[in-house]
Amino acid sequence: MNLQQVVPEAAARCGRDPSRVMDVVREVQARLGRVSDEAIDLIARELAVPPVDVKGVVTFYAFLSRKQKGRTVIRLSECVGCLGAEGHASAEELQRQLGIKFGETTPDGAISLEHTACIGMCDQGPAALVDEQPIARLTPERVKDLVAAVREQKLAEAGFAVADNVHKKGEVVFAEMEPGAGLKHALALDPAGVIGEVKASRLRGRGGAGFPAGTKWEFCARAAGERKVVLCNADEGEPGTFKDREILKHVPAHVFEGMAIAGYAIGAKEGILYLRGEYAYMLPALEKTLDEMREKGVLGKGLGGGKHDFDIRVQLGAGAYVCGEESALISSCEGGRGVPKDRPPFPVERGYLGLPTVVNNVETFATVARILEKGAGWFASFGTRDSTGTKLFSVSGDCAKPGIYELPYGLTVRELMALVGGEGAQAVLVGGPSGSFVKPEDFDRKIGYEALATGGSVMVFGPRRDLLEVVSGFMRFFVDESCGHCVPCRVGNVLIKERLDKIRAGHGVAEDLGYLEELCATVKRMSRCGLGQTSPNPVVTTLASFRGLYERRLTESNGLQPDFDLNAALQAAVKAQGRAPVFHED
Amino acid sequence: MSETITFTIDGKKIPAKKGQTIIRAAEEAGVYIPRLCWLKDLIPGGACRVCTVLVNGRPQAACTQPAAGGIVVQNETEELFRWRKNIVAMLFVEGNHYCMFCEKSGNCELQAVAYRFGITAPKYPHQFPQRAVDASHPDVLIDHNRCILCWRCARTARVKDGKPIFGVVNRGIDSQLAVGPEQLGETELKATDKAVEACPVGALMKKRVGYAVPVGKRLYDHEPIGSDIEKAGNPA
Ligand SMILES: Cc1cc2nc3c(=O)[nH]c(=O)nc-3n(C[C@H](O)[C@H](O)[C@H](O)COP(=O)(O)O)c2cc1C
Ligand code: FES
């Protein structure tokens, strides 16, 4: 296999379409273990895009690389959820077994070892991806078996299957549904009627921001343009979130049907499911579901006796959390760097390739299919007034039963903890790192848009966790995942993490807390997209609810900034010279 | 055809054409909104965020946000002033900026905005990144140490020179201006290209002309940046 063969093949597969750079570079990476500078030039020529743009794409995504990677790449999740004691031990064992450090490749070119951000296996960490295959519940023992299996190329047979952990199936998302039942009811209405039904259900988007789905569809339906697009957001990158993984595994047809319904409502014939690169292992099963749906006449041309044409393609990502932000998702679907866009115009007016586009979360579409099957009134009878329906919670961390729970909105943190065996937690993080750390005194607050909003991530931190270490881990995540386009997010998060770590190291002084608050406010208020507007939240919410944790680590200020311990730093010199420094005071 | 609307900035009535951005309308009315990545007649970049104003209380970049009839814009508030200053301070520690021996000193927009804001010393810890200088081109050089990633050169080269030679590589704090193919000398860039003039700082510079204008006679040596806008809109 060489470049001259692989690149033209990959380019031909997507019709040499300049907006499909992602697919081509993904294929080159998969087949050749890297996208070399030579490959970049060749791809640029084949797709008629500037070479510097291809280089921009290759260097943006974590799973693409200009340098040669091993034939197999092992990526250990370095997410806070995964890196407990077992995680650190497994990381050590991986390095020992492979004889290399993270970031290196074995001398025979067989295996590369890397760290990666949350891979959505938070309920069964420590976890890793071996190429596309997820491996869960790692222990040093299992690491030995894993490395042996990889070396013998027998990973598939080695029995490393991941668990489901769906502990509570509710009426809306996971209940059985006759294929096409929702779509059938939708097609019996006119498009405005479908939008009316979704509005009447008061369904709010399940991806985190909670925008009313019906209203979004109405905007898009009204937007000028013949060609429109339905985009399903399966980027699921917020640490602690893995609900879409289970939806796509158990009820993918509900999601695709919801997309077809949205297509009918807004007048779109095309759908795209953007699947995060970490979930690439699900692609074959999803393609199979799509084929089955086409056979059953739930997708394809002439649906409902010629009323609607709709089909769906899957777009794979390549490792970038920011691509979950809807306008970055669109940039990435267009084959570019996953950089958010300026709004206005909003995607409903000008989205994918400039076409009016509805972007919704996986769970939102699955829920829509049910609403059209059972009716808005039935749906709204679950949950609360402002947060109707059931919601999937991804529960992970220090609790007896981590996993997925489909529950009506409106329960309290305390009730949820009782259900999952998370009593005694020192803090519960609701809504992922961009949400808020809740302290025990606030466990009677309700989960829902009225109080604690969440896209579904619930992380439980037991009494023995070092919360500031957790916070620092999340800040590292945001530093790594910032797209780098705007200054406050690109630089500000680095400065926040730096000062936080200074406090953790015992060098902080009282003024550092004010310094952090001012920095956090600047990043939140001045950043261009939702990533920077929420990335300081781990610090902001712990400074508000767990200030003592910071204060206990501060030292007395002598008017100088003690960035380091002078005496400790001098010890190497003291040892070499055989004499201690003399301090003069006046 | 262009419909005229009015809105206010800090209480002052501002006329605007429908669809015009806040920064443009403000400029025409003699109100200076600080900016770094914005350049006239170029698609706005929305990257530096220095132009952030409050629109009906919400922070928005004035360079990308269209004016709308009746909106209430705040440009000079104590908070905005602090946050903008913080962002400019971030830029100074993100790269390696040595104003005292930079040829651009006095003509540099970053330096000029910093002076206008009253910044005289670094506020945050220097990051001291390792960055390269690309001197491969006979007439133009890139010093990445001084680049603030405003993408003005990249956008200008594409839109005005018709040469998509600049782009971005990496992400987050590692983001960098890049050229395609590899080095500036291999591109079709000419010293006369508009892109070369677009750089607000000392990152993309013509060789051998650094001191043609003596210090003391440079663009921002006597009056703060933005004074021209304020004067034009408010004739004495
Ligand atoms: C940094 C960032 C990451 C996001 N990641 C996701 C994601 O993985 N999945 C998702 O559905 N929404 C994500 N969102 C929210 C999307 O921008 C968007 O609001 C959502 O996809 C809309 O769908 P919904 O209304 O059905 O929730 C993210 C937002 C931000 C700012
Ligand atoms: S001038 Fe508006 S973001 Fe830079």
Image (cartoon, rainbow, N blue to C red):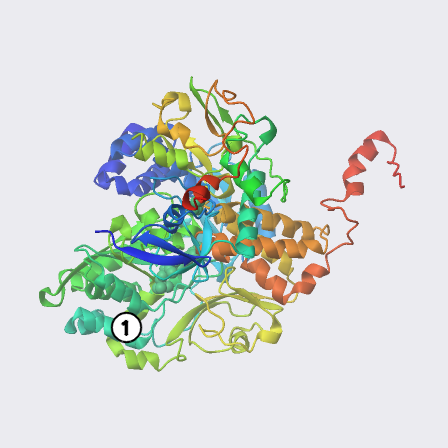
Q: Give coordinates of residue A220: x percent, y percent.
A: 25, 61
Q: From this view, report whether residue A210 is shown above or below residue A338.
A: below
Q: Is residue A561 above or below residue A572?
A: below
Asked whether residue A78 is in view, the answer is: no
The one nearer the camera, A59 or B112, is B112
Q: Position of residue B131 (x, y in %)?
A: 53, 31
Q: Is residue A114 left or right of residue B183?
A: right
Three-letter amino acid code of the residue under disc 1: Val
At x 56% / y 45%, what residue is drawn? B117
Q: Which residue is mark 1?
A: A198
Residue at x-position 29% and y-position 33%: A7
Residue at 73% x, 60% y is A552
Determine the secondary structure under disc 1.
Answer: helix
Residue B134 or residue B147, whichever sits in front: B147
Quadrant containing ligand 2 = top left
Q: Is residue A31 visible in this depiction of the protein?
A: yes
Left or right: A144 as drawn, with respect to A311: right
Q: Nearer the viewer, residue B61 or A139?
A: B61
x then y, percent, for residue B224? 53, 39
Q: In the rendered image of this protein, does residue A415 appear above or below residue B139?
A: below
- The verdict on label 1 being within 8 Å of ligand 1 is no
Q: Nearer the viewer, residue A207 or A31?
A: A207
Q: Crowding at label 1, few (<14), some or many (≥20) Cα neighbours within 10 Å?
A: many
Number of numbered tags placed on the structure image: 1
Coordinates of residue A159 in the picture (x, y in percent): 43, 55
Q: Specify the subunit that label 1 lies on.
A: A
